[in-house]
Image (cartoon, rainbow, N blue to C red):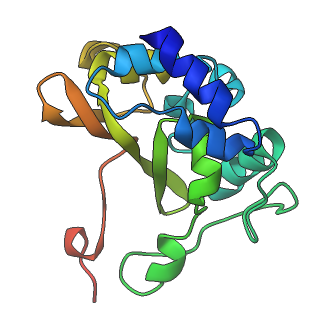
Amino acid sequence: MNRIIFALLVIISPGCNHAEKNDDSVARSENSDSTYKTQKKDSPFLGKYHLTALMRKTPVEVGCILQTELSYTDSKFNCSYKNYKNNGDPCVKTEEYYEGVVIPNKIAGTIHPLIEDIDLSFEHGNLREITITFKDSVEISTVKKIFSLPKSISHYPINVTDINYKPTNPNYTRWLSITGFDHVGAGDVDCK
């Protein structure tokens, strides 16, 4: 079956650009392990950076990594931004408090072809949470393998407080979130 799918992909996609090939290569089935085997297994980005290693980094650090590794330059948070300091707060300077890099969908797919969307949530100048939406349901064990995620909470790196899979059933997910620290907003502090 995998040979048939691969042959069809080769026949259909020779004129497509890289992003379109990645979109076409994602079979829409619950058997994500076999889908994963028909795609390029090793993402150069994920081979160099574990998503958990990005947690608690500044927007400039994350932006510079994206610029260096994926040739995506955020208009504000990139390698040329020097001496970044976040002076925002959850009460008054809220826009600055939550400022950070936004990853366009076309760039998200270059990190891995199964990714539809990545949302980065920053607070007080640090990456608080990464939320990934997949193009289709993916087996949780495959997600752990692709993103080099720990098998249990006892193995979380020190900069990660939670990893959550929102399952479509007990073994599959369409969403992954990695949290570096708890949210602290206006409702959590004494705003005067």
Is residue 158 depicted above or below 114 in this figure? above
Give the quarter of the figure containing the C terminus: bottom left
Is there any visible trace of residue 178 in the rendered image? no
Residue 123 is situated, as x and y percent measured from the top left of the image, at 45, 62
Please give the name of the residue rendered at 36% of the width and 45% of the height, measured from the top-left corner: 181
Residue 160 is situated, as x and y percent measured from the top left of the image, at 39, 32
Is residue 5 depicted above or below 160 in this figure? above
Q: Residue furthest left?
A: 170
Observer-nearest residue: 72 or 159?
72
**Figure quadrant of residue 166:** top left
Please give the name of the residue rendered at 48% of the width and 41% of the height, measured from the top-left corner: 115
Is residue 90 depicted above or below 47 in this figure? below
Is there any visible trace of residue 157 in the rendered image? yes
Give the quarter of the figure containing the N terminus: top left
Q: In the drawing, does residue 175 fall left or right of residue 103?
A: left
Please give the name of the residue rendered at 47% of the width and 52% of the height, measured from the top-left corner: 117
**Figure quadrant of residue 86:** bottom right
**Figure quadrant of residue 109:** top right
